[in-house]
Amino acid sequence: MTAKDTTNKQKGFIKLLFIAFLISISLLIIGGITVFALIKDAPRLDKDKLENAQSSIIYDMNGEKIATISGKEYRLPVAIEDVPLNVQQAFIAIEDGRFREHGGIDIKRVGGAILANIKEGWGAEGGSTITQQVVKNTYLSSEKTLERKVQEAYLALKLEDKYSKDEILEIYLNKIYFGHGAYGIGAAAEVYFHKNVKELTVAEAALLAGLPQRPSGYDPFKHPEIAKERRDTVLSFMEKNNFISSDKMKEAQEIKINNSLYTEKKKQSFQYFIDYVIEELIANDISENEIFTGGLKIHTTLDPNAQTYTEKVMTGTDAIPFPDDNFKAGVVLLDTKSGAIRAIGGNRDPKNQNVKRGFNFATDIKRQPGSTIKPILDYGPAIEYKQQSTYHQIKDEEIEINDKTFKNYDDQFHGMVSMREALVKSYNIPAIKTFLEIENDKNLEFASNLGIELEHAYPSYAIGGFGDKDGVSPLDMAGAYAAFGNQGTYHEPYSVTKIEYPSGDIVEYQSKPSQAMKEYTAYMITDMLVDVVQEGTGTLANIEGLPLAGKTGTTNPPEGIKNGSRDSWFVGYTTDYTAAVWTGYQSTTTEQYVTKEDARLSKLLFKEIMAEVSKNIASTPFTKPDSVIEVEIDKRNGKLASVYTPANSITTELFVEGTELPTKYIPIKPKIENDNEEKDLQESQPTEERNKDKKENKEKQKEAKKEEKEKKNQENKENTENVNVNKKQEKKEDTSVNDADDPNQTNNNDDTQKDQKDDKEKTSQDKEDNQSENQESQIEQETEQNQENQENKETSNNSNNEKTEMSKEAEKQNNDKEKNTSEDNTGTDSGDTEKEENSL
């Protein structure tokens, strides 16, 4: 290599270094400018804000303030010197193991978080220290953005400059939210253990340290098993950081959660609605710390009047006599058109009763739905995917699937029944058969479109006998049924409409509509459910003058209980409101179950609440879409009704436009060969139709005989005239010359004589015919008069018989109606609750 080449190579290397230097400087400048742009809007550190949390406020649908987020904030500030070391170490171990070493930002932890974010996407893992959490919870939102993270790091460094580690830890421990209205470690020790912070054990400290990340998710009252797992994780981190020994960790992990928890009375207006608001906010990625200490203004869908009345009737009234204080109920009231939650009855909470805090029977339960599931898993899919009519015929008969025999609640089989009758009377066998006709994934798809997610669906699911892993809440059922009342459009139920942040930012929420089914499906199901409350199993829930549809549901009791059930449901709707009501016991036993009398309470609760919220509005009737046609069916033969069909044999059913209709029925009038056939034909027809046909036939016969008689009289007249003409001709021929030699003369005379004889005979015969005809006419008239008298007598008898039969039928229907007042009068309407091992 020459000297010139070496020189050129050195120059090239220097040039590259210079370019790299320029790029680095440019990146630093760009980075600096970017960082500056991101932090220039960062808020100032405010001492008051650091030490005092800002309460969030909840507003109702009218914009009126109803409460702070927890109703009452419970705070017991504690100085850091009064917090035992093992309590401090529990929080440091799980939240920020190197808290005492870093200057506000843990570089190692940030690096791990960056790797996780690269692998799993931005926001997958945070690297926040305790210092950063204090900054975020005090000044910033919980958004996972680059701007917020840069500002958080910047403010954390500034905070470490102004405050000591103990001061920062004290602010953190007094500021964070632990659930159940408890802010800070002092209040948390009192709420969960009824202790002073100084008295907390290592196991108790570990449980509290695990709560701030997800207070509701790790709530030991609601989720003791999950809370124990979280507590044990904190204990293992304490052992890893050498805060406790391995033996101490194992000893603490052996302690049961419920052994030290303190249960208190909980009573607050609108609390169950507020609890659900919090759950919804968390589901929208807003941290509980921010919810309870971020100074948010939370606008909700709450109707205060509806909520107040719901809470009132939930405690029991003269019209709703609850059997005892352990009997539970859960209620959700929605706006049918939007899915907005107007009221939640989460628990009955009778006075002076200690309840397991926070459990909401309107939103938290997962129970078997009984027959309320039939429109969702059976008849809805049958109409949606197979365009079956409400008159679709199903044979109600004994059925066995996988060695399991299913039955109806009345222990009877009813032969061929229509879809409408099967749903109105809540028969189980037709529902199962309909379910089996649909491809299984279509049943699940239809339910999913209505917000009910099921992993699988066995035949028992068709009648609400869900397995242990599946179940529904009143919130689920209200959301699903509202779609039937909203022309097939589903809205996921929601409670939050808008959040205003202290910074002035506003985030609005609403439920996005989705077309869960065709309009014809929604209307045809609704039309049948209208009959359920008017004449079927839901008559106790009917409200006079209100266009209302709904369905009852009960479930089988555990072994050892014959005349009772686990759950009693009623779900119903108008075009304005939808309500779902569940009643039962939290734990069903042979001493504690829903009796036949108690099963009425779900319907009565629904009726009371729906009547109250609907009293000042004019609810519009359900509107039939153009895709649905009404068809009159002759119930006797299943064909289209005709002019011959008696009114009491006509039923009006719904068909999807364009689908095949039954053949029109026109009765054929066969030729009557004898009296027996005529009698058989007459007896085969309804009395009213038979009498009408007889009258028409008699009049036609009279008219025909009259025409025939006039024709014969005319013929007789003509014959008589011919006879007279022949006589005159005969006389004329007698006066002429008789030529003996004419060979034709004799023949002519013979013919003439013969003609004369024939004419005489014909005239005589005509006279006899006339006489005979007159006699027949007279006899006929007498016969007709006798028949008419007999028919009048039969009509009178038949009328009386019909009246008697109608009276008996009315009495029978009355008895059936009384019998069907509750589908549980003779049993339950769901199948065996045991899980089916295989779907068909």
Image: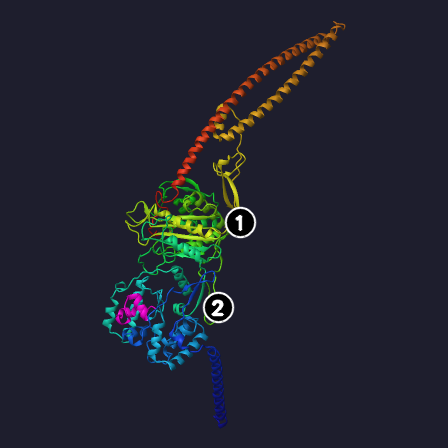
Q: Label 2 to label 1, Cα distance in Å?
A: 39 Å
Left or right, residue 78 beside residue 704: left
Q: Nearer the viewer, residue 177 or 120?
A: 177
**Residue 630 visible in the snapshot:** yes
Q: Dot 1, crowdedness within 10 Å: few (<14), some or many (≥20)?
A: some
Residue occupying the far right of the picture: 737
Q: Nearer the viewer, residue 275 or 8?
A: 275
The disc label shown at residue 471, or none: none
Q: What secondary structure is marked by label 1?
A: loop
Q: Which residue is mark 2?
A: 506
Question: Looking at the magenta stretch, what is its main secondary structure?
Answer: helix
Position in image of residue 613 (x %, y %): 45, 53
Residue 588 versus residue 1 in the image, above or below: above
Q: Nearer the viewer, residue 242 or 353?
A: 353
Position in image of residue 160 (x %, y %): 37, 80
**Residue segment shown in magenta:** 185-211
